[in-house]
Image: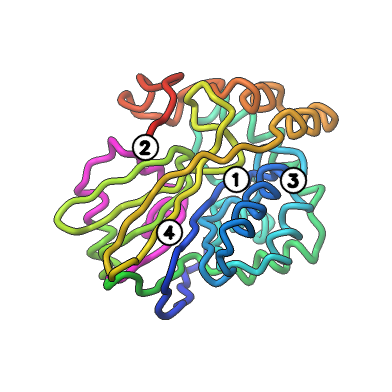
Amino acid sequence: MKQPQTTPLGAIKGRLLVFGGVYSNWQALQAMRAVANELAIPKENIICTGDIVAYCAQPEACVQAMKDWGVPCIAGNVEIQLREGAENCACDFTEGSRCDNFSKEWYPFAQAQLSEDALAWMRTLPNFLSFNYAGKKAMVVHGSYHNTSEFIFASTDWKVKQQNFASTNTDLILAGHCGLPFAQVQANQYWLNAGVIGMPANDGTPRVWYLLLDDRDGELTYEYHALTYDFKAANREMQAQQLTPAYAKTLLTGIWDNCEILPAQETQLQGQAYYF
């Protein structure tokens, strides 16, 4: 992967909407945009943590919709790999695992579907975004600052997160990639993962997740929100394209096909609905 680059956004004020992991799920992206319109949040206050393209059936439509929307967005590992013409998604799956085998189905499909215009737009995406919010220095990363493909979960040692704060000289990190929403705060440092909108959070429901931050009275607050969308239509689109049946089923059941990437703590939570 190329040397990381950061786009500074300056100071952001007012409500801030954060989402990620569109995963080529057109129906979820349209629902997310509808929520942003309903809440009257300007595009400058909406951030995407990357992985616009992945498992679902409409990669080109999702990229073009994001390009049209014009919200600040970073490149996920999938965008980085696709724009560089790489042969895989760089998720570092164990060779021969179910995730590895599935990636050999959806990744070539996405490559074949994307136009040169879509790839050119991906090449404009930075790896990071930086800004000031509610008196805090903030950074948007995909996996981590040190590795776009690194899976960082709630159970990941706080020392790993501290290294990211130290390297970025920030006290608020907005992350993606792992697919699960979570928040951790220690010593006035905030690690917030909005979760993803393209696939359920392995909690036994078809809901997906996004994050709303507020700076009212100069204090940082945040709330997780479930996003409902036409998951049955997204499932039908996947079936029509003969994409991975296990992922198509997950859209309906909210249960991941496997827990290969998950630590033990997160694995034990499979099927348990999220409440924030």
Number of marks: 4
Residue 110 image label: 3
Q: Which quadrant holds the C terminus?
A: top left
- Residue 21 horizontal side relative to residue 135, left or right: right
Q: Closer to the N terminus: mark 3 or mark 4?
A: 3
Residue 211 image label: none
Rendered view: 46 above or below 90: below
- At mark 4, the secondary structure is loop
- Residue 117 horizontal side relative to residue 212, left or right: right
Q: Closer to the N terminus: mark 1 or mark 4?
A: 1
Discs 4/2, front: 2
Rendered view: 193 above or below 268: below
Q: Closer to the N terminus: mark 1 or mark 2?
A: 1
Cα distance in 3D space between marks 1 and 4:
17 Å
Discs 3/1, front: 3
Of residue 120 and residue 208, the one placed in the foreground of this image is 208
- At mark 3, the secondary structure is helix
Identify the magenta region: 136-162
